[in-house]
Image: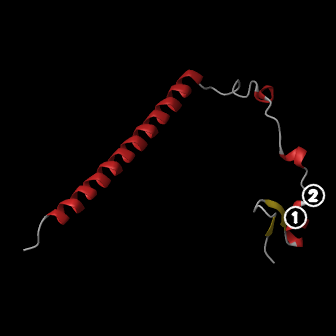
Amino acid sequence: MEIKYVYDAQGNETAVIVPIEVWNKIKHIDDKKSIEVFQPSKYRGIYKNLELDLEKEIKNLRTEWLRTMNYLTDTIYINLLLSQFNTLRKNWKKSIPSL
C-alpha cells in the first residue's frame, strides 16, 4: 500500500492515508522533543580549551566563502556566455543559404 492523499471539492489536500507500517514508525515521535529551540548559552565556552586563533579562523572561513562564491559566479557567467554563443551559432547557420 502507498501513501494516499484526500482532496476536497476545490482540490485542496485535506488528509493523508498512510500504510500501518509507516504509522507505527511515526506515531511515537513527540513533536515537542523533535523541535528544539536553539539556546546559545548551551555552547558558551566550547572553544576555550582549544588552542585556536578565532580571528584567523574567521578570516579563513571568509576567504573560503569568497573563493566559493567567485567560483560559482564564474561558472554561471561561463555557462551564460556558452548559451549565448550557441544561440548565435544556430542563428548564423540558419542565415547561411545552403549551396
Give x and y (percent) for residue 17: 85, 68
Instruction: Characterize the local packing of mark 2: few (<14), some (14-19) or many (20 or more) Cα atoms within 10 angstroms.
Output: few
Q: Say left or right for 65 vs 89.
A: right
- Pointer 1: residues within 10 angstroms few (<14), some, or many (20+)? few
Residue tagged by mark 2? Answer: 28
Residue 41 in which image quadrant: top right
Q: Quadrant of the N terminus?
A: bottom right
Residue 54: x and y in percent read 59, 23
Instruction: Determine which residue is flagged by label 1.
Output: 25
Q: Nearer the viewer, residue 76 or 34?
A: 76
The secondary element bearing badge 1 is classed as helix
Residue at the image position 27 percent from the left and 58 percent from the top: 86
Q: Of residues 8 and 52, which is closer to you in this image?
A: 8
Q: Is residue 4 left or right of residue 73?
A: right
Residue type for callout 1: Lys
Q: Residue at x 11, y 72 (%)?
A: 98
Taking the view exactly as shown, the residue that stands out farthest to the bottom is 1
Which sits in the foreground, 81 or 41?
81
- Residue depicted at 40% across the width and 38% down the height: 70
Q: Indicate the quadrant containing the C terminus: top left, top right, bottom left or bottom right.
A: bottom left
